[in-house]
Amino acid sequence: MKDKNDNEILCKYGSQNAIKNDKVILELLKKYHIDANDFFFQLLLNWPKIAKEGFSNHVKPFEYKENILIVICDNSSWASQLQFEKRRLMKKIQEVFPEQKVKNIKPIVKKV
């Protein structure tokens, strides 16, 4: 069953046009109690635009707590690259989500 507010929720940040009318996704969000307005959920949806395509394939958000974004990097080279991209990423996140204050981005290197 689709609530009349579902489209409004999914369109809050204007980047989810591909899913705003997808009943299956809406049902899954409800089933797993995922709030479509949740910052981390929205960050995941917007990550390819925020981090840029090549970078976003190798560095992905993992957790957000106490204003610190933890990302998983494919290897130590991508973790090093994150240090160069950190300021730009934090600025872009602030532009897309002005109500959030990401104080830092910390990498975790994926273990093989």
Image (cartoon, rainbow, N blue to C red):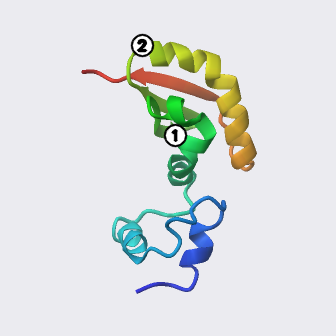
Marker disc for residue 76: 2
Count of numbered badges drawn on the protein: 2
Q: Quadrant of residue 14?
A: bottom right
Front residue of this view, candidates 98 and 26: 26
Residue at horizontal 52%, vertical 24%? 106
Which residue is found at the position 34% from the left and 71% from the top? 31
Question: Looking at the picture, which amino acid does disc 2 mark?
Answer: Ser
State how far apart marks 2 and 1 are (Cα): 21 Å
Quarter of the N terminus within the rendering: bottom left
* Element marked by disc 1: strand
Residue 45: give x, y in percent of width and height.
52, 52
SS for tag 2?
helix
- Please tell me whether residue 17 is drawn above or below residue 112 in the rendered image: below
The numbered dot on residue 4 is none
Q: Earlier in the sequence, mark 2 or mark 1?
A: 1
Residue under numbered circle 1: 64
Identify the residue shown where x is 59% and y is 16%.
83
Q: Position of residue 79 (x, y in %)?
A: 48, 17
Residue 25 placement: quadrant: bottom left
Side (left or right) of 111 relative to 47: left
Which amino acid, by three-letter code, is at mark 1? Tyr
Name the residue located 50 percent from the left edge and 47 percent from the top edge.
44
Packing grade of label 1 (10 A; few <14, some 14-19, many >=20) is some
Q: Residues within 10 Å of mark 2 (few under 14, many from 20)?
A: few
For the C terminus, which image quadrant? top left
Horizontal arrangement in the rendering, residue 74 relative to residue 16 (left or right): left
List the single residue furthest toward the front: 54
Q: Is residue 52 left or right of residue 59?
A: right
Query: Relative to residue 78, is residue 40 depicted above or below?
Result: below
Residue 67 shows in this picture: no
Q: Is residue 59 visible?
A: yes
Residue 74: x and y in percent read 38, 24
